[in-house]
Image (tube, rainbow, N blue to C red):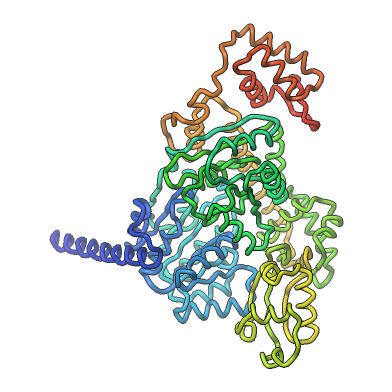
Amino acid sequence: MGREGDGEGFLVFVQIWGMMDRALEVLRRVWGYAEFRPVQGQVVEAVLAGRDVLALLPTGGGKSLCYQVPGLVFGGVTLVVSPLIALMRDQVEGLRRRGVGAVAIDSTLPKVLREKALQEAAEGQVQFLYASPERLVMESFQEALRGLPIRLVAVDEAHCISQWGHDFRGAYLELGSLRAVIGEQVPWIALTATATARVQKDIIELLGLREPVVIRQPFYRPNFYYAVVYDVDKDKRLLQSVKKLSGSGIVYVSSQRGAVQVAERLRSWGVSAAAYHAGMASQLRSAVQEAWIQEKVRIIVATSAFGMGIDKPDTRFVLHYDLAAEPEAYFQEVGRAGRDGELAYAVALYSPQDALDMERRIQEKYPAHPFLQALYRQLEGWAGAERRLRLSLSQLTQRAQVSAHLLRQALHLLSQERLLEVQGEVGQRAYLRSRVGPEVWQGKPLSPQAEWVLRLGGAALFREGVYVDLQDWAQEMGVEYEELYRELEGLRRLGWIEHDALPEGVLAISLRGRPTPTQWEAIRHKYRDLLRAAQVRLRFMLGYYQQRSICRAQYLLRYFDEEIPPCGQCDVCRGYYRVEEVSENTLEALQAELAAYMEVPRPVREVQGFLRRRFPKSAEQILEILIAEGQVELLSDWRLRWRKKK
């Protein structure tokens, strides 16, 4: 019996290693890499053995290859769950460039194209089927999946399943039901870049992973220099930093407007920089990204939309002009530098106003329940019996009497709760299909824009139709979006095409449900808990920015349950905050002097001069400490005042 068992074990061993040989062949042939990274190899081997896997690989760890290579080895279809439309499209385009059949089905894809994608998957033309969690939990879509030869399920950004994760998505909670649809024998792999022990437990339990292999790559990157710069004048510190640092870098900001403004500021100082944000046409974003990768542009000033799926190993620094409010987001963003193993810098610019700004951003991310409920009732009143309305974003903000940012976030949350659907905004795709044959187009004189529509739409325009980003088409044509929209409307009135495009800035909102009081109460509890969890993460990050006694890397990694000795090279470890020895009596006297001197608000330079006369070697560090500890407050006119004790 023992020898028979040993023989079976040896046979399994040989089979796995045979599959690993095939995996390496796929890796070399499709991606051009000679071998897997060590942790990648462990993950791929476990998946090929048919095990459920939870893989925790930090940003830049090559998570996508951990399911893409096994997917090609297994054959059939790999079903990939992804919460971000932009990330899905990026992955699909990357696979198609390598000759691999891939398609993304999100909530915006027209029915005719959804059916075509599923048919191609059933016929073996598609190896990777990407779908949003909201689409996957629909009964009609699950029924369609039953007819597909699914061999592997990959759940990307798996932390979204946990209310303790930093980007909770309710639809993830229902993904476990897919096992009964797809088959119990199909292995699952859950992937994330950042997850605490509590979030890992949620992923395993809520997805129903069966005795999973948990593989975690240490988050610590010994080639990183972490630093926090305290100042009320961020622009001065930004310029100092980019001049001092060498190589390519990323500057993160919190808004699209901020990306444009900071990039313009850098260029005015003679620094090569470009803005990148989700509001830009995708072709323009791609052009900016490519210019940065090829080092035609030195610095990208970006919102969090930048970085997904981008691999530029020699990025030398990531600088946060606007601070990240969550450790997961911060860790992912700084992790985009230094992937070549060489020294990289993670620098955060901190001013006293930042704590208030971050608290405001969190409050806007999770709007109060009474506001959500009141907004929905307003929408119901405006929509009428048809439960549909169409108006510009500016009209909607005026009616609701809220900011555009808060309104967008509220609509996003309501759509996640499946209470409404929103179409519109920059970057929204549109469906076009010709209602007449090509001979009609060819038999009539066409405007330049119509000729472009014919050329860009291609043969698909006359079959199932095309699903495109009209901002990209407008850029390709060299016209404004509105001019292209008018042309499409003219062709529609002629009866030549059908389309669902909207004028620029216009939203089309369809109300889907009539939530009961019980549903509203469940929504209230959910977003109250999410807000509290976000505030806990914010307090952790404020501690990171404000403290000056614990190694930066050590402090940050504690959040992820990883203990390391002091890194020896961050600003704290290098002793930047060790100021001139000051006796307790002298310090008390200084604080009393400053309290009296700064009772009247003073310009920053005046305060710096006051301190320099007393402490010529460390006046700047002392002011930074006073700012970080909140003893000095920054007023709206950029003057400093001593904060009175309450």
Q: Nearer the viewer, residue 605 or 368?
A: 605
Q: Position of residue 130 (x, y in %)?
A: 52, 67
Q: How many marks?
A: 0
Tell me if 394 is positioned left or right of 526 in this view.
right
In the picture provided, is 571 more to the left or to the right than 469? left
Image position, residue 200 (x, y; %):
47, 48
Instruction: Judge left or right: residue 199 versus residue 356.
Output: left
| Residue sitting at the far front | 270
Residue 646 at least partly seen: no
Q: Is residue 627 above or below residue 541?
A: above
Q: Position of residue 61 (x, y in %)?
A: 44, 51
Quarter residue 422 falls in = bottom right
Can you say whether 521 is above or below 104 in the image? above
Is 338 rendered above or below residue 62? above
Viewed as shown, does residue 3 lie left or right of 83? left
Task: Name the quadrant of the N terminus.
Answer: bottom left
Q: Residue at x 52, y 67 (%)?
A: 92
- In this view, the residue farthest toward the top is 585
Res 401 seen here: yes
Residue ID at (64%, 77%) = 456
- Where residue 443 sits: x, y (%)? 72, 93
Q: Dividing the image into 4 quarters, which one contains the C terminus?
A: top right
On screen, 615 above or below 109?
above
The residue under the point 69% across, 22% down is 631
